[in-house]
Amino acid sequence: MKLILSFMLELIFGTRTKIKLLQALAASNRPMTRNELANITHSGLRSTYEQVEELIALGVLKETVNGRSKVAIDPEFPLYESMRDLLLSSAEYLRTPQDVLAAVHRICGDNYYIGAFTAARQKISPIDYDPPIYLVNILKSRYKRLYPRLKALGKLANIKVFERSMGEAGDVTIVIRECESIPPDVIRIDYLGVEVWIASAERGIIECLTSETPFTLYGIYLSLLQNRLDNALDIVYLKRLAEEEEALPLVLAIMSKFNEVMGKDLFELTSMEKRNARGIVDEKEIKHAVNTVRG
C-alpha cells in the first residue's frame, strides 16, 4: 500500500509543470481551459495538454465541457483537502524578501554577513531606491559547502541566485561572494523582522563604492545622504574604513560635492580633506539624490 501511494504521489507531483498547473487550479475558484493554464504557468502548450491528461487519468482533475473544455481539481479525489492545502501553502513559501533572508540565515548560520546596499540602508527608511537584492558574503572556509545550498534557492521561480556578479534580477535576488573573515563591525540584528548578520552602515557604503555591485550610484549616494541627515552615520569610522580600502579621496570628493550642491558644510570637511578630495563623482546623480530628499 505504501509503495502504491508513493508511486501515486510521484505521478501527481513528478514534474514542475504538474505542480504549477495544480497550484494555479488550487488558487482559482473556477475551472480553467488548457490554454489558460499554459499562459498562467508559462508552460508549453504540448506539455500542458499532456500533463493535464495524466492528471485526469489519475483522478486528480476532472473535465467539464460546457462550450469549451475546462478542468478543475476534483473534490472527490481522496487526497483533495490535504493536497489543496499543500498546494496553496507551497505557492506562498519563500515569496517575500523576509522569507528569503530567513532561509539565508538558516542555511549559513554564523558563517556569513550581508553587506553593501542592504547594510548601508539598515538604519534608514529608504524614500525611493530599495531593490530586493542581497549581497551575501560567506566565509571562504565554508564557501564550498554553503554555496550549493544557497544556489538551490534559485530553482524557485521568484528567486535568482548568482555567484560574484548579478545577471537578470528576480523578485528577490541573492549575489553570493566569499570573504576571508567576518569584519569586526558585523552584528546580528532584526532586519525586516528577520534575524540576520549584517555589516555596519559605514562598511556597506564603502563596499558599494569600492567593489562591483548591482546597485546604482544614485542609490548609494542617496543612502549616504539619508544616513547623514538622519544622524545615523559615524563619519569618523566611515573615513577610516575608506582609508583602509584606499577609497578616502573618492569618499571625500562625494562629500565635498554634496556640500557644494546643498550649499552647506553637511559633512564638515576640513581644509586638508577638501584638498585631498579626488575621484570621479557623478554630479547628476548627486543632484538627483538631493532632489529626492528635498521632495
Image (cartoon, rainbow, N blue to C red):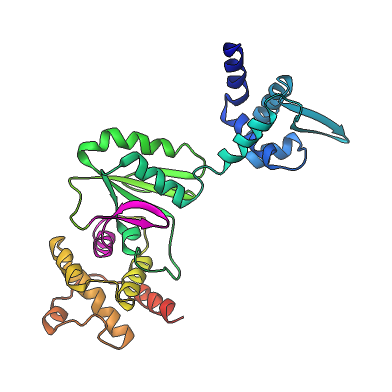
Tell me: residue 181, above or below residue 247.
above
Q: Residue at x 14, y 63 (%)?
A: 246
Q: Position of residue 181 (x, y in %)?
A: 18, 47
Image quadrant assignment for residue 200: bottom left
Residue at the spot 88% in from the left edge and 35% down from the top edge: 66
- Pinpoint residue 276: horizontal percent, then vertical percent: 13, 76
Residue 72's image quarter? top right
Q: Is residue 42 visible?
A: no
Q: Where does the magenta region start and end?
A: 186-212
Residue 158 is situated, as x and y percent measured from the top left of the image, at 51, 45
Q: Quadrant of residue 15?
A: top right
Q: Is residue 1 above or below residue 145?
A: above
Q: Name the residue rendered at 80%, 29% in the picture.
A: 63
Closer-to-camera residue (99/253): 99
Q: Is residue 154 left or right of residue 36?
A: left
Q: Residue furthest left?
A: 272
Q: Quadrant of the N terminus?
A: top right
Confirm whether the magenta stretch covers residue 192.
yes
Left or right of 272, for residue 225:
right
Q: Is residue 132 above or below residue 18?
A: below
Check if residue 267 falls in the magenta segment: no
Looking at the picture, tell me which residue is in the foreground, 202 or 82.
82
Residue 32 lies, in percent from the top left, at 76, 38
Q: Is any atom of residue 11 visible in this view?
A: yes
Left-right relation of 130 to 9: left
Q: Which residue extends farthest right?
A: 67
